[in-house]
Image: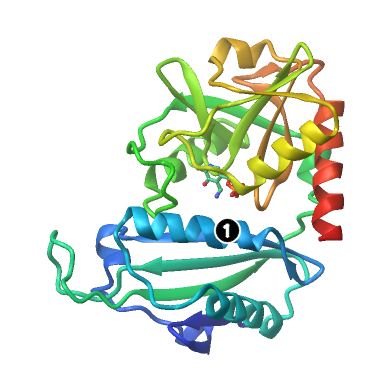
Amino acid sequence: MSRTVYVNGEFLDEENAKISVFDRGFLFADGVYEVSSVIDGKLIDNAAHMARLRRSLSELRMVFAMSDEEIIAAQEEVVARNGLVEGALYLQVSRGVADRDFALPKDPKPSIVMFTQEKKLVDNPAVAKGWAVITLEDIRWRRRDIKTVQLLAPSLAKQAALDAGADDAWMVEDGKITEGTSNNAWIIKGGKIITRQLSNDILHGITRKAVMRLASEDGLVVEERAFTEDEAMSADEAFVTSATTFVMPVVSINGKGVGNGNPGSVTLRLRELYIEEARRS
Ligand code: PMP
């Protein structure tokens, strides 16, 4: 069945939803995006995604006229028109059509597109087994806090992981893990839950923030600091967070089992807490 896609104010069948060859999103990866999860037909933590979208736009000096209310109304309509119960809503704003030039256009007309993807998020079959990850050098640019559509490095890293028989890659810079290809990386060691501190080196995950709060509320100790590859390999538990995986156990790193090699109990508890709250809100 064809999806209904949103393009610059119009709801179109996906076959007819088109963007110009001259769109700067296509030519320069000059665009930002957000992925909000949908459970029971409702967008999860969407206000936080809107706030991050605004920050990404502003860091790239992109002025976008639509208000949050207008964007959210369009998001909800895309979800409804596609009858999406569970999955993801992808939203992208690019600087729009301009003749190709490295200088930013003087009178930009940003493009916005949205589409849905149906996915099993709550009963994700991967959770029971957990993910195997490999580590790879982080070759991305230095503003990973901006959620841009230039995703070639993480896309190649993901494929390298799949080619190696793993599920994802944890990227490494100066001996420390930055993050997964499209998720934030965490370890649990000696009762402490450790995830890298916020900076320009990683994306400021919306799920990361929610899980940090849920962990603290649950009486767990959270430490925000960078951790090494060796620390990760000798951790008791490991996991990743993102809008579409929620909390996903990591059971091996470079072929070596984490803890007892099964999804960790604290990890699974955090996943439960996250889903419970998402459903309630
Ligand atoms: N890091 C990167 C590089 C990502 O692409 C994502 C997914 N958008 C995340 C972290 C997780 O962010 P969020 O929890 O907001 O989905």
Image quadrant assignment for residue 19: bottom left
Depth check, front residue: 137 or 218: 218
Image point 41% across, 48% down: which residue? Answer: 146
- Judge whether 270 appears above or below 193 on screen: below
Residue 137 x %, y %: 41, 25
Secondary element at tag 1 = helix
Q: Position of residue 200 (x, y in %)?
A: 41, 36
Taking depth in this image into account, of 94 and 84 the one nearest to the observer is 94
Quadrant assignment, res 103: bottom left
x then y, percent, for residue 193: 72, 23
The residue that mark 1 highlights is 49
Residue 66 lies, with reference to residue 247, above or below; the image says: below
Residue nearest the viewer, comparing 177 with 152: 177
Q: Position of residue 212 (x, y in %)?
A: 70, 36
> As drawn, is 238 to the left or to the right of 69?
right
Quarter of the image that includes the N terminus: bottom right
Can residue 123 be seen in this snapshot?
no
Q: Is residue 176 above or below residue 246?
A: above
The quarter in which the C terminus is drawn is: bottom right
Whether residue 100 appears in this view of the structure is yes
Q: Mark 1: is the Cβ under 8 angstroms from ligand 1?
A: yes
Does residue 17 sit above or below 24 in this rendering?
Answer: below
210 displayed left or right of 50: right
Instruction: Give amino acid for label 1.
Output: His
Q: Residue at x 77, y 32 (%)?
A: 216
Q: Residue at x 36, y 61 (%)?
A: 31
